[in-house]
Image (cartoon, rainbow, N blue to C red):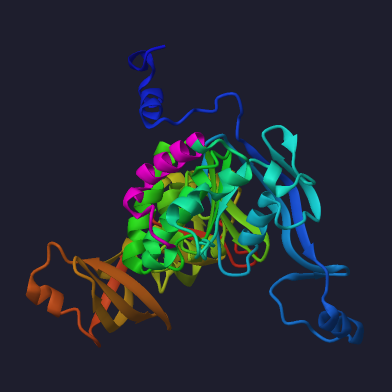
Amino acid sequence: MPCSALPEKARTFARMGIVQKSEFMATVTLKDIRKVYPFNGDDAKKIKKGEELKTNLTILPDGLLAVHDFNLDIKDKEFIVLVGPSGCGKSTTLRMIAGLEEISGGDLFIGDKRMNDVAPKDRDIAMVFQNYALYPHMTVYENLAFALKLRKTPKDEIDKKVQEAAEILDITQYLGRKPKALSGGQRQRVAIGRAIVRDPQVMLMDEPLSNLDAKLRNQMRAEIIKLRQKINTTFIYVTHDQTEAMTLGDRIVIMSDGFIQQVGTPQEVFNHPHNLFVAGFIGSPQMNFFDAKLLKKDGVYSVVLDGHEVVLSDEKQKALAENNVEEQDITLGVRPEHIVLADEGVNANIDVSEMMGSSVHLHVTAVGQDVIVIVNTMNMTPAEVSELCSGKAIKFDFGGNNCHVFSKETGINLEAK
């Protein structure tokens, strides 16, 4: 079939010399996956003596539980991001998918094949590491070609794949250099290129941008988005950076202490956090939390903070009613960008103001705690902006559609189904 007769996406791949692998669906399924690390000698002695272990992991009789009942269905060509604080189990999960960590329980499928006992080299995956892991004595070309040489790939095919990858990643001009002559961003491009020349069904990326400075991270995020559009594979990406998670992922898996806290699109986890952990983790600056009261009068829900009552939106009314939520003390969550200065509302005093260009971040004291308020300054005069100074008394308000109500006892969002 001539190239012009192909669909647009197929023509794009054809022009780039990339073969689409339609015969295999690169789905990844994790069913009740768990990882238990046996106690080391010192820990075993402490357990025997009844001493307390200092760890954020769940302690079981046979070891430390790093990942617990991890269930996830990843679609073909989906970009999934595992995100969470250090020690939450995200890298351990990725390494189990790669075959670098033994699975303690559950089942891993790539396509329709169970992979628990399959060697890493036979899983048709490629992995990009945080520290690049390039061979310093080899040129960029040799680094890219190395895995193909091990496979006994013909030289002309190796050259074709290396040149294609170099063009995609804009590193053709560096093929003759060694890693020490490259910047951090260029080295990471080489590391990614070494993975994509293998034409993997699944691309695993373990915090690939964490060693780069802020400017390079932004650039490389954009490069990864472009790369995703150019190669035909499933991505599983690990990061502790919520900005990376929100900008890269089709769906985000938020983890804490070895447990999945929520799975959803970036918009879903931002707008409808399942619990206090997700609400506090997603968003920068993080969500403000208050001790408040949820009222129900004649079937209408409202929240009361510092004597100020706000009626909740129709959407929230419906969700709370469907869950048969009664009046109770709650933890109220409101994001800094959803708080507005007002003539009537919650009393506060400005402690510190931080100019951020088009906005000012106010650190205020209200209801006996620190609160962050983001004020857009685009339509304010310089005099009005300068009035937002330390010690000034203000009032703030928030909309009934922009606040979140969490159970005091469980931390679960009372709107959650």
Indicate yes or no whether the magenta region holds residue 175. yes
Q: Find the residue positioned furthest to the front.
A: 155
Residue 287 image point, x, y percent: 43, 66
In the rendered image, which quarter is residue 307 located in?
A: bottom left
| 271 within the magenta span | no
**Which residue is more in the foreground, 170 or 72?**
170
Tell me residue 272's x, y (percent).
Answer: 49, 51
Q: Nearer the viewer, residue 4 or 350?
A: 4
Residue at the (39%, 46%) spot, across then down: 166
Q: Is residue 348 above or below residue 67?
A: below
Horizontally, residue 256 falls left or right of residue 249, namely: right
Main SS category, magenta section: helix
Using the image, determine if residue 375 lies above or below residue 121.
Answer: below
Instruction: Tell me where residue 263 appears, x and y as whole percent.
Output: 57, 49
Question: Quadrant location of residue 396?
Answer: bottom left
Q: In the image, which residues are magenta?
A: 156-178
346 and 45: which one is in front? 45
Residue at the (52%, 66%) spot, across then down: 131
> Where does residue 312 sit, x and y in percent of width and height?
42, 53
Q: Is residue 131 visible?
A: yes
Q: Nearer the viewer, residue 222 or 144?
A: 144
Horizontal relation, residue 62 to residue 76: left or right: right
Q: How many numbered discs?
A: 0
- Figure quadrant of the N terminus: top left
Figure check: 24 above or below 5? below
- Residue 376 lies, with reference to residue 298, above or below; the image says below
Q: Is residue 312 visible?
A: no
